Image (cartoon, grey):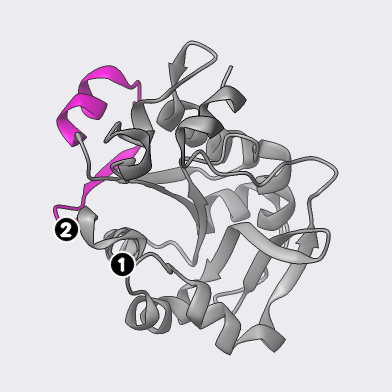
Amino acid sequence: MTHTETEDQVAGLLLAAGGGRRLGGRPKALLTHRGRPLVEHAAQALRTAGCGRVHVVLGASADAVRERARLEGCVLVANPLWEQGMGVSLRAGLESLAGTGARAALVSLVDQPGIGPEAMARVLAGYASEDSLVAASYDGRRGHPVLLGARHWAGVAAAATGDRGARAYLKAHEDEVTLVECGDVAQPYDIDTEGDLSRLE
């Protein structure tokens, strides 16, 4: 499959709705990294990796994110129920891709700045069809980003509850998931607590 075909068929899906409960309620999308909001870096990484279309799910402080972050060319998806957890954001994002012609979604999280375009491009390269399930792994442990072929979206949405996102679905379909080792090009840490803020530059 050519690079352009993949660009057309795989959409980037960035989950950026979290309110940063353990960060004193600072929305993660607006945390500053290298002088710009995290959400900008993450959206750009998906583009650089080869996603021609990028949908960004916003929740906490959505208006402030729209104002402060440069997200031109991205489709911004509102998730008013973001406080119910990542599962709702994943559902909202997948629903927003219905009817766009996307045949797979490359899902990444806004609070993982150690995962950049190199890891995303590796997982993207695993795309073959709407049946594809591909995930980055770090020393053999599954992590993000995750590529979900369109045939799996309904099942993923049905299983996405609380903060689990696609985890339950991927566990149930473990034998279908292609793992792509990314530990040499990315670090899968989350920015969850005050202590994690030191990882931002």
Amino acid at the residue labelled 2: Leu
Q: Which amino acid does label 1 sit on?
A: Arg
Residue 86, x across and y down, in percent: 35, 60
- Which residue sits furthest top? 35
Q: In this view, does 192 lie to the left or right of 146?
A: left
Q: In this view, does 88 lie above or below 154?
A: above
**Quick check: can you spot residue 145?**
yes
Mark 1 closeness class: few <14, some 14–19, many ≥20 residues within 10 Å: many
* Front-lying residue, 15 or 9: 15
Mark pair 2, 1: CA separation? 11 Å
Q: x%, y% of residue 131? A: 58, 80
- Residue 79 forms part of the magenta stretch: yes
Residue at image x 71%, y 53%?
2
Residue 73 in sight from this viewpoint: no
- Residue 23: give x, y in percent of width and height: 37, 35
Residue under the point 44% across and 61% down: 102
> Do the residues bearing badges 2 and 1 touch, measured as CB atoms within 8 Å?
no
N-terminal of the two: label 2 or label 1? 2
Pointer 2 residue: 81
**Whole-percent x, y for residue 188 in the image:** 66, 47
In this rendering, position of residue 66 left or right of residue 201: left
User: Is 44 placed above or below 11 here?
Assistant: above
- Frontmost residue, 183 versus 97: 183
Q: Quadrant of the N terminus?
A: bottom right
Left or right of residue 10, residue 100 in this image: left
Is 49 in the magenta?
no
Q: Give the range drawn in magenta.
A: 62-81
Please tell me which residue is depicted at 81% across the width and 66% down the height of the picture. 140
Residues 103 and 16: in front is 16
Q: Name the residue under label 1.
A: 91
Secondary structure of residue under mark 2: loop
Answer above or below: position of 25 versus 170.
above
